[in-house]
Image (cartoon, rainbow, N blue to C red):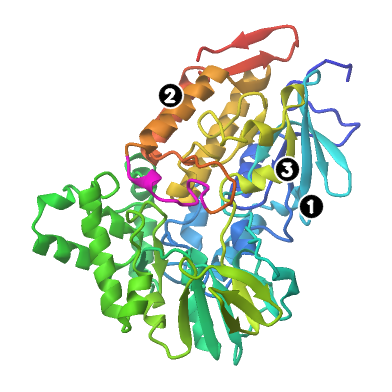
Amino acid sequence: MPAGQANAIGSRPSETEAYDVVIVGAGFAGMYMLHRLRGLGLSAKVFEQGGGVGGTWYWNRYPGARCDVESMQYSYSFSEDLQQEWVWSERYAPQPEILRYANHVADRFDLRSDIQFDTRVERAVFDERARDWSVTIAGGKTVRAQFVVLATGCLSNARMPDFKGLSDFAGEVYHTGHWPHQPVDFTGKRVAVIGTGSSGIQSIPIIAEQASQLTVFQRTPNFSVPARNAPLSSQERDFFRTNYDEIRRKAREEMRNGIYQELPEKGALEESAAERNARYGARWEKGGLTFTATYNNIALDKAANDTAADFVRARIAEIVKDPEVAKLLQPNDHPIGSKRICVDTDYYATYNRANVKLVDVKANPIEQILPHGLQAGGVTYDFDALVLATGFDAMTGSVARIDIRGRAGQTLNAKWEAGPRTYLGLMSEGFPNLFVITGPGSPSVLSNMIVSIEQHVDWIADCLDYMRANDLDSMEATRAAEDNWVAHVNEVAHGTLYPQANSWYMGANVPGKPRIFMPYIGGVGVYRRICSDVAAKGYEGFTMTTAAPVQRVAASS
């Protein structure tokens, strides 16, 4: 095409390898994005660094890995046939089952033909004259695309700690976020687990059953509630299948976290201590994330939050027989729920086992990894295998690994150096035609991810259809809209207790990462209405250009 001549959507040149859309990542977001684009008749290519679909469920195969959202809700809603035909086996699906589901979706909708596996996207550069992207994959090959959609996931970039001597360890080393694809047997081995976040809390009970000795190195204890996982009955499945329309509607429109549940009508301090304990006790026995929804002000009022935190700390003291160990496992440095609460099976009871030891590395920091163990607080611990449950560079880490260059060669990493900046969590000013699914500034990790993924994918697909119908070839967030949205995200966050925790929501688990509250805490329903309103107003807050490069049409911000 002539220099400076833009193409209308759906008319990419055939003589070069070019697409309407390049999608980065073949997890649940990338697969659904591909499906929607095909339905619009647009050409799309997915590049996936892993060897298969599934995203975070492809990489996270550690012992005990399972979703903390009930499986009947952690599933796609876009296909009624898919909803009705898939049979979930447990209340909380384990990783292998979720991965089978992802593969079933890929096969059922014939998605693999447009996915290139074992391929990492290294660079994406925006061409201001052609108004498209040059995307470079590992090995140096470059393709062009009018749009790029980052479906890279919020928890897919495992964070390797920088312990002195880690490379010198002579035994087996595993990271929960990059677990081997073949079974790992710890039978008869001395094992160390570093980290007690969600992956540590899920894997520690399983590893303890195998290992001759398990030593857990904990920096910060986390609140965890029992999952009460169990096989799903046919009656439970039928309830969801019969009522899916209403369940999905309520999850999208009425629930803050996108999870269908009973909404609380009272604040925690509106009832007596006896009534509160009974209500907390019922939620504890039921199990799952809904514990923090026992009352409607747990996330807002510190005194209300203390009642829930005290209840969980009391349960820990009841379960763990050694009072000193119980004290170490009781969180006291953050409000309950301000870090993503964990869901476990027999986690606290595991510390009653004779072969399990807990080490407080806040009081006794890890000094170095040795060839056959580690040294912490001047004490040497010997072991045969090391498990790093050290989490992820959440929300921005996978995006940061790609050299993304927008207008005037500005890199996205440089723009986000002081913290991520987006409009609606979907686009960033200076980077036209670049979308992020469940990016910072959207509900993402504070919600049922499938609900948020589907909403973003549908919004992007509808937007591209609108642009094609109106002969528009590029789209970019305005600076004013982005500034206003960033301010709104921060304002809403600081009206809650969430920023009081040094959590990965704030980037606090990564040394040197700016302390910015990244997700939007206003709720899935509120956020969805905002996005729909923006679209209804002709994509207010975005600047769009026509296919003729000299004409520009700007929507107000």
Image quarter of the N terminus: top right
Q: Position of residue 378 (x, y in %)?
A: 56, 76
Q: Between tags 1 and 2, which lies in front?
A: 1
Give the crowd class for mark 3: few <14, some 14-19, many >=20 residues within 10 Å. Answer: some
Q: Secondary structure at mark 2?
A: helix
Q: Position of residue 370 (x, y in %)?
A: 68, 77
- Residue 45, image quadrant: top right
Q: Which residue is mark 1?
A: 119
**Magenta stretch: includes residue 501:** yes
Which of the two labelled residues, at mark 2 and mark 3, occupies the earlier sequence position?
A: 3
Image x and y of residue 33, in percent: 62, 42
Which numbered disc, 1 or 2, marks the residue that appears first in the sequence? Answer: 1
Quadrant in the rendering for residue 433: top right
- Does 218 sit above or below residue 510? below
For marks 1 and 3 on the same chain, the one whose residue lies earlier in the sequence: 1
Pointer 3: what residue? 402
